[in-house]
Amino acid sequence: MLELRSGGTLATNGKTLSGYAAVFNSEAPIGDFAEVIRAGAFTKSLQSGSNIRALYHHDASALLGTTKGGTLELREDAKGLAFSLKLPDTSHGRDLAILVDRGDVAGCSFGFRVRDGGDKWEQRGTTLIRELLDLDLQEITLTSDPAYADTTVALRSKPSVYETRGLRVLWMDTL
């Protein structure tokens, strides 16, 4: 069973989204229980070379990029599952660039399957806790309603050589 976690015109040429699709050791309320992702939960998925997709709101028709296509890069670090996504020049890509730039979409989510033995349940007082230890990652998603509040997404674009040169010229003019 696949589990999901989510609680203007702008050209996307050169636009990249980056952030964290998941943050380790941060509890999130998921219905009747709380969930926490542990470091290493995505390691096997990332090492497998499987095609992981980037979507908008878990919608397969709103494809933004893939690891196989080289438009989505994923890596685990000490904080969590970091990503870099080259936005497509499509209606979804342009819309998302605007929504992220405005701050309307500021979080991430992910879709996964738990591998055998990949989770652990524990009762802590009145709270049932699920620890995610080993996941088969299917997708990351950009969303305005993330289940994990610590996820992030930001829009960045590399300035063109002309823009960089222009800034230097303006700086030189001030001397």
Image (tube, helix red, strand yellow):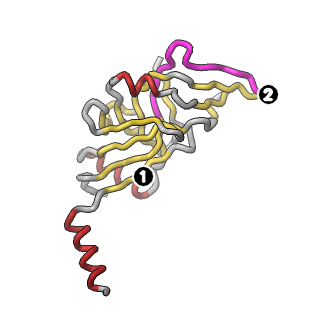
Amino acid on which the number 1 mark rests in the picture: Ala
Q: Which residues are magenta?
A: 110-124
* Left or right, 117 with reference to 21: right
Label drawn at residue 49: none
Tell me the distance, in whole angstroms, between the alpha carbons under discs 2 and 1.
37 Å
Instruction: Give the dominant element type of the magenta stretch: helix, strand or loop.
Output: strand
Residue 68 position, x and y percent, is: 27, 30
Residue 145 position, x and y percent, is: 51, 42
Q: Is 119 drawn above or below residue 109 in the view shown?
A: above
Q: Residue at x 64, y 34 (%)?
A: 29
Q: Secondary structure at mark 2?
A: loop
* Left or right, 20 with reference to 33: left
The question of residue 117 being in magenta is answered with: yes
Instruction: Give the residue number, with chain letter if any, for mark 1.
Output: 154
Q: Is 76 drawn above or below residue 166 in the view shown?
A: above
Closer to the camera in the image, 92 or 158:
158
> Upstream in the sequence, badge 2 or badge 1?
2
The furthest residue to the right: 125
How crowded pointer 2 is (Cα within 10 Å; few <14, some 14-19, many 20+) is rated as few
Residue 137 position, x and y percent, is: 43, 26
Q: Quadrant of the C terminus?
A: bottom left
The furthest residue to the bottom: 175
Q: Secondary structure at mark 1?
A: strand
The furthest residue to the left: 162
Q: Is 111 drawn above or below residue 164 in the view shown?
A: above
How crowded pointer 1 is (Cα within 10 Å; few <14, some 14-19, many 20+) is rated as some
Label drawn at residue 125: 2
